Image (spheres, rainbow, N blue to C red):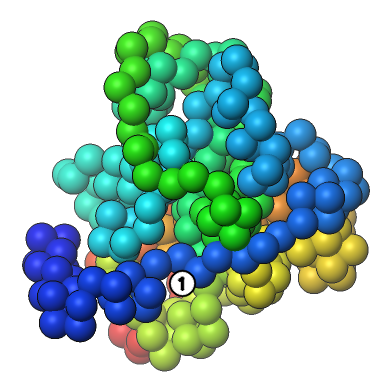
Amino acid sequence: MKKSTLALGILAAAVAIGYPTYNAMFSAPSFEISDEKLNAKFSHYSQPEHFICAQDLKKLMDSNEDVVVIGALNPMKPDAPIEGSFTMWRDGYSAKEGAYEFDGMSNTTEEMEKILSTYGATSDSTIVVYAATSHHDAARLFWQIEALGHKDIRYLDGGLNAWVGADLPTGNANPSQEESDYQAAEPTHEHTALATLDMVIQAQNNDEWVIIDTRGNDEFNGTTTVGGAFGPGTIPNSVHINWTKAVNEDTTLKSVEELQALYGDVIKGKKVIAYCQSGVRSAHTTMILQNVLGADEVYNYDGSWIEYSHAHYEEKQPNVTVINGQQS
């Protein structure tokens, strides 16, 4: 379904049921979350400097520090952004139409540099990313900005839900900003662990590797094909750990002990490739494995199931096989 058609449908629904009711039904729920508990949790993470709570972000934004806050917010939802932040959605940080035969890939270094320049960011800026309710989109931005070699990149734990729960100001986003000339420090994915199709093929039958499928149960079982993919199924020999198992009911990340219990035995002594539909949910898992558990070699498969299913169902590459899929 085209975005314009979806937008008209949402507008019609809002008119039909009344905006206050629509807003209550579809906007991000708020959660009151203790900053002391979050900071105590962060202190046990492998790289606590990459995580921040809502109250500390507000203090940072009120200071004279060079901070740029970016929300990955779906424009079809009535979520009021963090005051003073910039907002964008997947079409802004994904590859342009026609760049690939399939959707979901990340955009170029040059395009990310242009976006961050528009926000006035420099290589010395503290960049904080956030999302609403399903915070995997913030993790995707985290991964793409880190791919530029940016050092001070932080993830707002609990995102907009925690910000609203702390009764912090929203609205007045996307402020006018003098454009900078952002230059990527290391314009390569090598240090951020980008998995390619060839790597995935090689890893399937290699005991040194484990492939983690971070999608939902129906996707893993092959009973559902999400729009954009070319057929159902799972990458052979992958381990299924739904990304949602890593978050609490209040949308914050779980403790290091809980995450170690979830992932520890699976990744112990292994190199890891995480994948999902289009590298968004798997970016969340990648962030956790790297920055919470301190795993050394974790790779996010950018193309994920969209690319893999295209190679299998459309290109019929003989070395790209699936399980839980359709019979050819």
Foreground residue among 204 and 32: 32
Q: Nearer the viewer, residue 203 or 29?
A: 29
Residue 301 x, y percent position in the rendering: 52, 52
At 70% across and 70% down in the image, what residue appears?
Answer: 248
Indicate left or right for 282 with 157 as reference.
left
On the rendered image, what quadrant is the C terminus found in?
bottom left
Q: Would residue 6 be seen by someone viewing this image from the given angle?
A: yes
Q: Is residue 107 left or right of residue 123?
A: left
Figure disc tally:
1
Residue 4 image-quadrant placement:
bottom left
Look at the picture and state if 79 lies above or below 47.
Answer: below
- The percent position of residue 269, horizontal first and vertical second, equals 86, 55
Residue ID for mark 1: 321
Residue 313: x and y, percent? 30, 71
Kind of element beneath mark 1: loop
Q: Is residue 281 left or right of residue 277?
A: right
* Residue at the image position 64 percent from the left and 28 percent from the top: 60
Looking at the image, is 67 positioned above or below residue 74? above
The residue under the point 66% across, 74% down is: 249
User: Could you tell me residue 181's position as x and y percent?
Assistant: 38, 9
Quadrant of the snapshot with the N terminus: bottom left
Left or right relative to 97: residue 188: right
Picture residue at 54% right of the left edge, 84% below the top: 217
State whether residue 295 is above or below residue 148: below
Q: Quadrant of residue 3?
A: bottom left
Q: Nearer the viewer, residue 116 or 107?
A: 116
Q: Is residue 198 visible?
A: no
Q: Residue furthest top?
A: 181
Q: Amino acid at mark 1?
A: Thr
Q: Residues within 10 Å of mark 1 (few under 14, many from 20)?
A: some
